[in-house]
Image (tube, coloured by chain):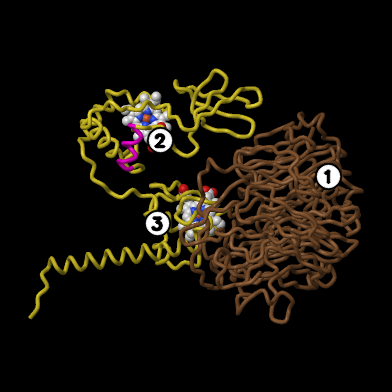
C-alpha cells in the first residue's frame, strides 16, 4: 500500500536529476546522471558478495532484441520498446500501465532495426520518441497521452530510436537516418507544452559556420544523425551530443571537404541550441564511423591544471580527452587495432594512412563498419578513475559503389563484407581516463553489442553476444559473477533500490531481468 | 517472303529470355548492393546480418516466401523494403537465391555403386542420411545441394583443409569432442560416441584445435570408387519426407 502511494506521488523536478547522487536508489535519466558516466554509487552489491546475485523477477516484452535502458523513479520502472512504454512495479515486475502507438504500415527503418533505447522523465511526465518521429509526453501515473508533436518525416528516413534527454524545462531529441541522406538536427521541445524551443542543424546551411566544408548541394543530403543520447553540464548550461556519419556513407566523391559537423561532438547552449564548440573525430568520413556515443564528463587535473573534461572512446578506434568548456583537444590514442591513421596530430586530427578508402574491389580496414565501439554505453568510475568500454576487434572489407539520392531510400554508396570470423573478437577494456592507456582487459569471444555500468561496489557489469551477463572487478577485470540470460544481449545495465535493497536490471532478448542478493 | 525457321525463332526467344534473366540479375544485384549489402555484405557473405550464401534460407524456403520476407523485414533487426516495386522485389529475391545455389554440374561416376562404398566404409558411423546413421558429423541428407563435387572430393581426401566456420576440436580435461556451443564461462561438446558434455571453463583445462577434422582422410580409394562415392553424395538432394 505504501509502495503504491509513493508511486502515485512520483514527481521529478529537474533539481532531482541535477542532484542524482543524493538519491542513488533511483535511476532518473538515461545514463543516471547528466555526466553520462553510467556509474551507480550503490555499494550493497560489491566484490565480496556479487557471487550470490540471483534473478528476482523477469518481465517479457512482446518483441525480441530489446535495447531499453530503464528509468527508475520511487519504485516505478519505466521501460520502452519501439513505439511503446510500460511502467512496472519494481517489487514484482507487474505493469502499472502499458502504452503503445501503432507503427504506420508504410514505415520503413533505413539502415537499422526497429528498436527504442529508453524514455526520459521530468516532473509528472514520461517522454518517448517513436520510430515514426513523434515525441510523445505521457502522464507518469496513468500512461495517458498529454501531448504529441511530429518532429520529422519518416518517409524521408528520419526516425527516432534514441532515449530523449530532459534538461531544464526542455526535452532534447535526436534523429536516426544517416543511411537515408537526411539533413540531421537536434531538437528541443518545451516539456510542458511540446512547443519547439530550438533546432540545431548538424549539417550547416548557407551562411552558417561550417557550411564551407561542403561543396555544391551535398549538405542538403549530408546525413549527420543524432541517434544516441548525449550529456549535459548544468553549471555550463551546455548540451553535449555525438553527430553521425556524413551521407552517402562509403562514397565521399560527391561531398569533398571535412563535412562538418558529421562524426563530431558538439557543445550547444541549453537555452538556444547555439553552437559553443565542436570537435570532429573523423573529418570526411568514408567508413560510417558515427560519433554515436554517450559523451562522458568528469573533472580532473591535466598538466597541472584542474579541468572540466569530456572523454570518448570513438567508433574510429581512438580514445579522446577534450576540455569541455572549449573543446580543446588534450590527448588521444588508439585503444583497438586500427589501420587507417598513423596517429593524431596536436589538434587531435587523424594523420591518414594511404589506401584505407573503400573501393569497388573492397579495402580491408580495422576497425569494422560498426566500429571499435558504438551506441552502447561506456562507463566511468570516479573511484577507479578508469573509462570502461566494450571494444570490438574486427575488420571489414569496405566497398564503394554509386549513390543516387532518392527520398526515403538508402543513400549509402557501398557497404562491408565480413572477413574470417576466427579473426574477430572483443574485450571489456579499462582505460586510464586521462591517457586512454589500457589498464586491463577481459576478453570476449565475439565483438560486443551491449553497454557497461560501473558501481561503487567496485564492479563493472557487462554482457556478451553469447548471452552472458556478468560482473568484473573494476580494479582488476577479474570475473566475479555470471548468468546465462538465453539471448544475445544488446542493451545497457542499470542499478537501483527496491525497498532499500540494491538491484541490477538488464534487457536481454524478449526479457528484462532484475537481479538482487 | 521470309520464313523464320522455327528453331531459329526458338533460339532467339531463348536468347531474349537469357538476356532478360541477365538484366534481371544485374538489377537484382544493383538493388542488393544499394539496400542489403550494408548488412549482409557486398556479395552476401554476411555482416551485421547473416550470410545469405546458403542453398536454402531458413526463413524463406522459396521465391514467394523470400519476396514476402524482403518486403516485410524481420523484427527487430531487419527493415522491410516497402519502397521496392513488385518487379524489383522479384529481381532482388532472384539475385539472393542465385547467391547460395551451386551451379549445376555433371558428376562422373555411378551413384548406386557409390552408395555401396558409403555403406562399406562405415561413413554412417559418423553421418546421418535420411534418418539413418550416427550424428557425430554433419547430416548428409541434402549434401548434394549444399556442396559441389570439388568440395565433396576435398572433404573425403583432405578433411582438415575444408572445415566449416567455427569448427573446433576440444579437449576438456580427459574428454575430447567437437565444440557444440561456447559462451564466456562454459563450453559444450559431443564426444566420438555421441555423448554430450558440459564444462565450466574456470575449473577445466581446455585445449583447442582449429584445423583438424576428426574425420579420417580417405586417401586409398581407387579413382572409380571415389568418383562413385562423390556421385552418390551429389545425388543426395534432401529427404522426401
Whether tag 2 and tag 1 are in contact, CB under 8 A, the answer is no
Secondary structure state at the residue bearing disc 1:
loop
Q: Residues within 10 Å of mark 2 (few under 14, many from 20)?
A: few
- Numbered badge on residue A385: 1
Q: Is residue A351 above or below residue A62?
A: below
**Left or right of A108 on screen, residue B5:** left
- Which is nearer the eye, A332 or A151? A332
**Left or right of A301 on screen, residue A188:** left
Q: Which residue extends farthest left?
A: B1
Magenta-drawn segment: B148-157
Q: Identify the residue under disc 3.
A: B64
Mark 3 → mark 2, Cα distance in angstroms: 37 Å
Q: Horizontal and vertical percent for residue A129? A: 71, 62
Mark 3 → mark 1, Cα distance in angstroms: 56 Å
Q: Which chain is yellow?
A: B
Instruction: Name the residue at 23% across, 28% down.
Output: B222
- Numbered badge on residue B161: 2
Locate the N terminus of chain A and report the quarter of the image it occupies.
Answer: top right
Q: Horizontal and vertical percent for residue A165? A: 78, 60
Q: Can see residue A212?
A: yes
Residue A81 quadrant: bottom right
Closer to the observer: label 3 or label 1? 1
Q: Horizontal and vertical percent for residue A450? A: 67, 46
Q: Mainly helix, strand or loop, the magenta region?
A: helix
Secondary structure state at the residue bearing disc 3:
helix
Closer to the observer: label 3 or label 2? 2
Amino acid at each position: 500500500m505504501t509502495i503504491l502511494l509513493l508511486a502515485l506521488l512520483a514527481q521529478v523536478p529537474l533539481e532531482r536529476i541535477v542532484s542524482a547522487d543524493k538519491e542513488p536508489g533511483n535511476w532518473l535519466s538515461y545514463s543516471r546522471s547528466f555526466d553520462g558516466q553510467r556509474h551507480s554509487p550503490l555499494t550493497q552489491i560489491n566484490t565480496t558478495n556479487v557471487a550470490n546475485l540471483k534473478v528476482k523477477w523477469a518481465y517479457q516484452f512482446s518483441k525480441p532484441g530489446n535495447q531499453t535502458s530503464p528509468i527508475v523513479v520511487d519504485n516505478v520502472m519505466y521501460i520502452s520498446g519501439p513505439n511503446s512504454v510500460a511502467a512496472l512495479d519494481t517489487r514484482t515486475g507487474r505493469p502499472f500501465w502499458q502504452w503503445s502507438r501503432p507503427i504506420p504500415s508504410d514505415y520503413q527503418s533505413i539502415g537499422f532495426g526497429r528498436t527504442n533505447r529508453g524514455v526520459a522523465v521530468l516532473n509528472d511526465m514520461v517522454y518517448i520518441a517513436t520510430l515514426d518521429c513523434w515525441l510523445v509526453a505521457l502522464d507518469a501515473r496513468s500512461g495517458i497521452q498529454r501531448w504529441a508533436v511530429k518532429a520529422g518525416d519518416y518517409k524521408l528516413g528520419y526516425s527516432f530510436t534514441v532515449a530523449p534527454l530532459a534538461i531544464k524545462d526542455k526535452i532534447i531529441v535526436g534523429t536516426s537516418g544517416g543511411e537515408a541522406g537526411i539533413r540531421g538536427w537536434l531538437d528541443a521541445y518545451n516539456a510542458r507544452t511540446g512547443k519547439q524551443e530550438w533546432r540545431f542543424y548538424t549539417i550547416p546551411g548557407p551562411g552558417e559556420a561550417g557550411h564551407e566544408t561542403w561543396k555544391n548541394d551535398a549538405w542538403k543530403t549530408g546525413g549527420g544523425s543524432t541517434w544516441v543520447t548525449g550529456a549535459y553540464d548544468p553549471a555550463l548550461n551546455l548540451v553535449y551530443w555525438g553527430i553521425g556519419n556524413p551521407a552517402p556513407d562509403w562514397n565521399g566523391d560527391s561531398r569533398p571537404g571535412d563535412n562538418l559537423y558529421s562524426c563530431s561532438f558538439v557543445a550547444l547552449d541549453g537555452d538556444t541550441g547555439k553552437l559553443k564548440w565542436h570537435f570532429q573525430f573523423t573529418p570526411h568520413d568514408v567508413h560510417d564511423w558515427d560519433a554515436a556515443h554517450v559523451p562522458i564528463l568528469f573533472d580532473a587535473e591535466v598538466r597541472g591544471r584542474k579541468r572540466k573534461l569530456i572523454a570518448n572512446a570513438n567508433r574510429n578506434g581512438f580514445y579522446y580527452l577534450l576540455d569541455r568548456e572549449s573543446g580543446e583537444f588534450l590527448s588521444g590514442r588508439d585503444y583497438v587495432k586500427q589501420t587507417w591513421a598513423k596517429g593524431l596530430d596536436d589538434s587531435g586530427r587523424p594523420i591518414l594512412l594511404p589506401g584505407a578508402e573503400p573501393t569497388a574491389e573492397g579495402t580491408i580496414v580495422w576497425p569494422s563498419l560498426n566500429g571499435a565501439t558504438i551506441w552502447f554505453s561506456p562507463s566511468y568510475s570516479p573511484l577507479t578513475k578508469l573509462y570502461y568500454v566494450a571494444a570490438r576487434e574486427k575488420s571489414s572489407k569496405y566497398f564503394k559503389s554509386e549513390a543516387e539520392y532518392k527520398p526515403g531510400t538508402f543513400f549509402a554508396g557501398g557497404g562491408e563484407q565480413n572477413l574470417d570470423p576466427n579473426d574477430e573478437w572483443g574485450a571489456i577494456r579499462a582505460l586510464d581516463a586521462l591517457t586512454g592507456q589500457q589498464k586491463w582487459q577481459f576478453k570476449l569471444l565475439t565483438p560486443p553489442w551491449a553497454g557497461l555500468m560501473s558501481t561503487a561496489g567496485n564492479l563493472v557489469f557487462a554482457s556478451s553476444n553469447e548471452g552472458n551477463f556478468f560482473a568484473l572487478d573494476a580494479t582488476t577485470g577479474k570475473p566475479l559473477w555470471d548468468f546465462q540470460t538465453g539471448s544475445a544481449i544488446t542493451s545497457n545495465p542499470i542499478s537501483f533500490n527496491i525497498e532499500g535493497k540494491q538491484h541490477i536490471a538488464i534487457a536481454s532478448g524478449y526479457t528484462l531481468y532484475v537481479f538482487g542478493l | 517472303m521470309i520464313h523464320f525457321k522455327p528453331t531459329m525463332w526458338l533460339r532467339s526467344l531463348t536468347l531474349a529470355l537469357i538476356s532478360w534473366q541477365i538484366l534481371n540479375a544485374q538489377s537484382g544485384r544493383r538493388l542488393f548492393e544499394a539496400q542489403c549489402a550494408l548488412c549482409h555484405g557486398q556479395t552476401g557473405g554476411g555482416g551485421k546480418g547473416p550470410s545469405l550464401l546458403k542453398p536454402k534460407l531458413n526463413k524463406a524456403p522459396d521465391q514467394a516466401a523470400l519476396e514476402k520476407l524482403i518486403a516485410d523485414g524481420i523484427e527487430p533487426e531487419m527493415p522491410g523494403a516497402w519502397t521496392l516495386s513488385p518487379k524489383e522485389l522479384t529481381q532482388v529475391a532472384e539475385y539472393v537465391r542465385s547467391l547460395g545455389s551451386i551451379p549445376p554440374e555433371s558428376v562422373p561416376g555411378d551413384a548406386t555403386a557409390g552408395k555401396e562404398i558409403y555403406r562399406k566404409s562405415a561413413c554412417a558411423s559418423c553421418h546421418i542420411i535420411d534418418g539413418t546413421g550416427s550424428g557425430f558429423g554433419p547430416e548428409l541428407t541434402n549434401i548434394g545441394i549444399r556442396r559441389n563435387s570439388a568440395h565433396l572430393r576435398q572433404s573425403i581426401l583432405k578433411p582438415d583443409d575444408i572445415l566449416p566456420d567455427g569448427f573446433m576440436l576440444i579437449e576438456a580435461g580427459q574428454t575430447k569432442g567437437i565444440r557444440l556451443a561456447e559462451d564466456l564461462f562454459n563450453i559444450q561438446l559431443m564426444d566420438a560416441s555421441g555423448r554430450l558434455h558440459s564444462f565450466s571453463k574456470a575449473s577445466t583445462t581446455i585445449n583447442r584445435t582449429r584445423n583438424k577434422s576428426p574425420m579420417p582422410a580417405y586417401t586409398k580409394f581407387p579413382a572409380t570408387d571415389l568418383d562413385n562415392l562423390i556421385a552418390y553424395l551429389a545425388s543426395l538432394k534432401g529427404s522426401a519426407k
